[in-house]
Image (spheres, rainbow, N blue to C red):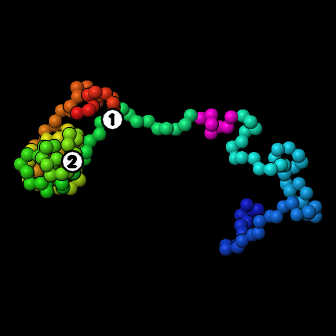
Amino acid sequence: MKIHDLAPAPGSNRRRKRVARGIGGKGGKTAGRGTKGQGARDTIPAGFEGGQLPLAKRLPYLRGFNNPFRVEYQPINLDTLSALDEAEITPAVLHAHGLISKGALVKVLGRGEFSGKATVKAHAFSAAAVTAIEGAGGTVERIPLPWAVRRPAQGSALTNR
């Protein structure tokens, strides 16, 4: 057994050391703070760097980042589509059933089973969704995005549809 193998008995509690209780024994008089100086006196705030601008103030505030060109889709799963019982499923049909908001971009995801030979029109599809729809005898049609190259930045005149 070595010194680093020693540990207190399970469940035991040791009293905290009470310093500055007279000069008899360890921890008396200066109470482990040395003599004089800032550290010997009252409390110093955590992160105080002796008058230098603290690290927490020197770093820029982390406000995060919002990508103005983010393309946000509303996801729809296969089990939701197969419950519709429609021959052609488009964003207009999904909006009529209350599944998406008006004018939203739709992405079909592959959760659940798809049954029925339906034509599914959406802006994006996961690979699993395409495999499941075509495996059930349906067809997949991608609707082009409403802008040419990339989404216009938020706040521009083209985003207010």
Q: Is residue 56 magenta?
A: yes
**Residue at 76 percent of width and 69 percent of height:** 15
Point out the image quarter for the C terminus.
top left
Asked if residue 85 lies in the magenta stretch, the reply is no
Where's residue 22, x and y in %? 91, 63
Q: Nearer the viewer, residue 136 or 155?
A: 155
Residue annotated with mark 1: 70
Residue type, numbered disc 2: Ile
Magenta span: 53-59
- Residue 100 is labelled as 2
Label 2 SS: loop
Q: How many residues crowd mark 2 within 10 Å: few (<14), some (14–19), many (20+)?
A: some
- How far, Cα to Cα, is label 1 from label 2? 19 Å
Q: Residue at x 70, y 73 (%)?
A: 12
* Camera-side mark, 1 or 2: 2
State the quadrant of the N terminus.
bottom right
Q: Is residue 96 left or right of residue 160?
A: left
Q: Is residue 46 left or right of residue 129?
A: right
- In the rendered image of this protein, does residue 27 appear above or below residue 126? below
Q: Position of residue 78 (x, y in %)?
A: 18, 52
Q: Residue at x 22, y 26 (%)?
A: 148
Q: Residue 14 or 49: which is nearer the viewer?
A: 49
Disc 1 secondary structure class = loop
Crowd rating for badge 1 (residues with CA inside 10 Å; few <14, some 14–19, many 20+): few
Going by the numbered disc 1, the residue's amino acid type is: Arg
Q: Quadrant of residue 8?
A: bottom right
Residue 136 can be seen, yes or no: yes
